[in-house]
Amino acid sequence: MVVGMLSDIRHADICELVQLWAINRVLRERGAMPVVLQCPDAEGCLPEFALEQFTVCAAGRRSLEAYGIYRQIGGFVTADSALAAAGQEDGDFPSEETSAPEGAFGGKGGPVPEEDSDMAGDLDEAEVSDGAADSDEAEDETEISDRAVDSDEAEDEAEVSDRTADSDEAEDEAEDSGDAETSSPADRQQSIDIRRAERKKPVFLEHPLLLLQQVRYHGISEKPAAGGKYAFLDIREQSEERMERAARLCREMGLRMIVCADNAGPARAAEAQFVRCARPEKYLGLIWQAEAVITDNYFGAVMAAMHEKPFAVLPPRKEQEAERLRSLLNELCLSGHLAEDGELSSQQLRTDNLIEFRRALHAMRDGQLEMLERCLAFEEEDMLVKCPVRLPASQCCACGACEAVCPEDAIRMVADQHGYYYPVVDRELCNDCGWCAEACVKKGRRQLVQYSDATLPEIYAAEAPNESGAYGAYSGIFRELVHFVVTQRQGIVFGTRLNERHEPVLAWTENEDEAAEFAEQRFLMSRTREGFRKIKELLDKDCFVMFAGIPCECAGLKSYLKRNYPKLFVCEFLCHGAASEELFHQYIAFLEEKNGVALKGIHFGEYPAGDYASGRVILADYADGSQSRRKYTNSAYYRMLEQQALVNEACTNCSYNGKKRVGDITLGEFKRMNFGEVPEEWRSRAVVIANTEKGSRVFASISEHVRAERTDYDTLFRYQHRKTAALVRERSELLARLGKKDFRGILKAYAKQER
């Protein structure tokens, strides 16, 4: 389900941003999808931290309905007492009347470059007139994005999102079967109305920073440059007297003094080093590494206490803030740290009873978690996949591990009306063995690579010749890997191809030319059951197997196998989201109708055809021997795939973006990057990441046929794969047209939205 986090985020300070981050983390770990709902009057640019970390949407009902998530909202939460009070008075936030302000969306996505916005090409493909498109009022092509955090090991636990499938009324109609038998229709409707009203009242968290243990903040903390031991001062109400007292205490303790310059006033100590802390990462890093902390504000006091630093608190001059600090320190049994008279001493820095403090901290954390659980009390059966895994449907990535592992063949992957596949169990065959839940990569381990030493991962910008044409920048590298596996290891290669019905299936071959097709990008999930079982059969016979797929397929295979096989080599392709298979089939039907002949095959990739742009095409082969090519830049369908307009809902909370890798080796493209920031010669190169010792050895074996240059993660993930897939505006309209098989209407609606 979706949980709305209410915030005036445009004007949020460091404290509120970190509070939202803590709430966001906890909600995700409990299976919810948090969305920051920006106040309608806070339209404008968002802080960079917010763009990187959160999904942000304008807090208007019409906006949420446009994205198809309003009815999925299970509750609201805020750390802003004013917003909480306003929401309690209204009883229904966001209001029915509030509309989405233009430009109030933050996150990934944004305008389509002009050279890629050839509306004539779009409308030619959709066979709709320019006049019909131009009559619609231009809309901002904004999207909402999810964030990915570069995390420590504590954050490598499963992060999951829980959103109901796009349904008009299922969310508020699911009732307990016992109540249904004893209640009248009027009583049941009254119960629904009460629950709906209750869930719209925002939950106010007074101390959300306490939700997480201090180690969890290390994942977003930026360590300061080495320079010796120091005391960190965050004093917002500075005076010469306060600065002199702080400087004297630091001299007594033999510490240099680092002062947060964001709050610096005219009073400055000569020996102090002033550091700007505009971003939360820097501030948290300074707290983390400090030997002592002196502060006069809530945020500094909480973070110093949680990190168990020696600290002192100077009382703020505003009585309301001072009272809040006194109350907090009393609850945490830390009242001795408050310097009521303004005098500072080393005695005030010490915590007298650490055990008592920790007990109080745990009690407050439990209280905040209990409050937060009120936002998560609306899970209903209609939100779950129809199999014993009991996973929210919006979280299922359709990897097929549960289907393949079922010993009774009781589970089948079945498409819904929009072409997204979910597991469905035959209850007559199911024996409740629990193997499906154990194999689920969202419920159990995500199968992430644990780097064995500091030399891994090895990251390259590489290229290899590919004389037969390419499906992508990395296809030459992939061919070399296939050649090594087939000739040097006598192995079998598994990957995805389209069958005669244009369905993506997991196939296998020992032929290098046939295996080359596995590198093609289709933005589709494969049918994996038979392929997974065949891989296990071959591995148990001590055969060498290479598996090529997108990250969730690779994770599903590893989870299905339940053990590490030395002769399994996993090649992972960087993914840009799995689109609806129904959308793909409607596109094929559209091409067949337009050309008057059956489609024999379709390929997405790069082929020798002159300049770079003209080489990137959708290539269609027809039964009469004819071919058609459409440039990516002229194809509204392809841009829908690239812009992730109709990806699986699980892609909005992908577990495998950024540095979270699954394969022995990872292949991708630099082409989607901003070429002003990477060398021009990398334009045609592939991303190669050797994640394991096995991957490093295999890549070294083909190195004489590859031209490679070492790079790093910061360069690689600066512009791609740092965030999860985006929800686009008017998703609900696109899904409605998809369900009605109105492909022309989808293209027209997307072309209008894109403008």
Image (tube, grey):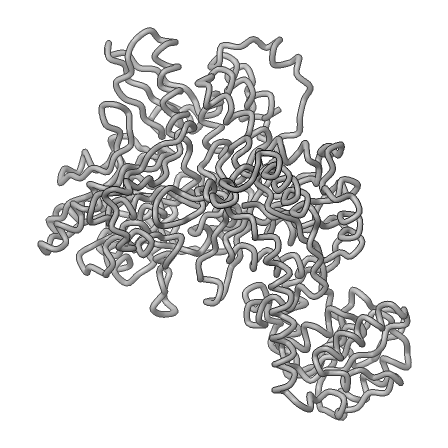
The residue furthest left is 541
The tally of labels here is: 0
Residue closest to the eye, 737 or 245: 737
Residue 261, how many percent across, how many down?
Answer: 78, 68
Residue 465 visible, this orientation: no
| 731 relative to 249 in the view: left or right | left
| 82 relative to 633 in the view: left or right | right
| 519 relative to 733 in the view: left or right | left
Residue 351, how many percent across, how many down?
Answer: 69, 88
Q: Is residue 585 above or below residue 285?
A: above
Residue closest to the eye, 695 or 63: 63
Residue 578, how many percent across, how many down?
Answer: 41, 37
Q: Quadrant of residue 660?
A: bottom left
Residue 168 visible, this orientation: yes
Task: Look at 60% across and 31% down and name the residue there.
Answer: 729
Q: Quadrant of residue 336?
A: bottom right
Q: Is residue 104 above or below residue 204?
A: above
Residue 453, how many percent across, how many down?
Answer: 35, 70
The C terminus, quarter of image: top right
Residue closest to the eye, 577 or 82: 82
Task: Look at 52% across and 42% down and name the residue there.
Answer: 182
Task: Look at 67% across and 78% down and name the residue there.
Answer: 305
| 229 relative to 121 in the view: left or right | right
Q: Is residue 730 above or below residue 457?
A: above
The N terminus, quarter of image: top right
The residue furthest top is 596
Task: Look at 60% across and 77% down and name the residue there.
Answer: 226
Q: Is residue 425 above or below residue 167?
A: below
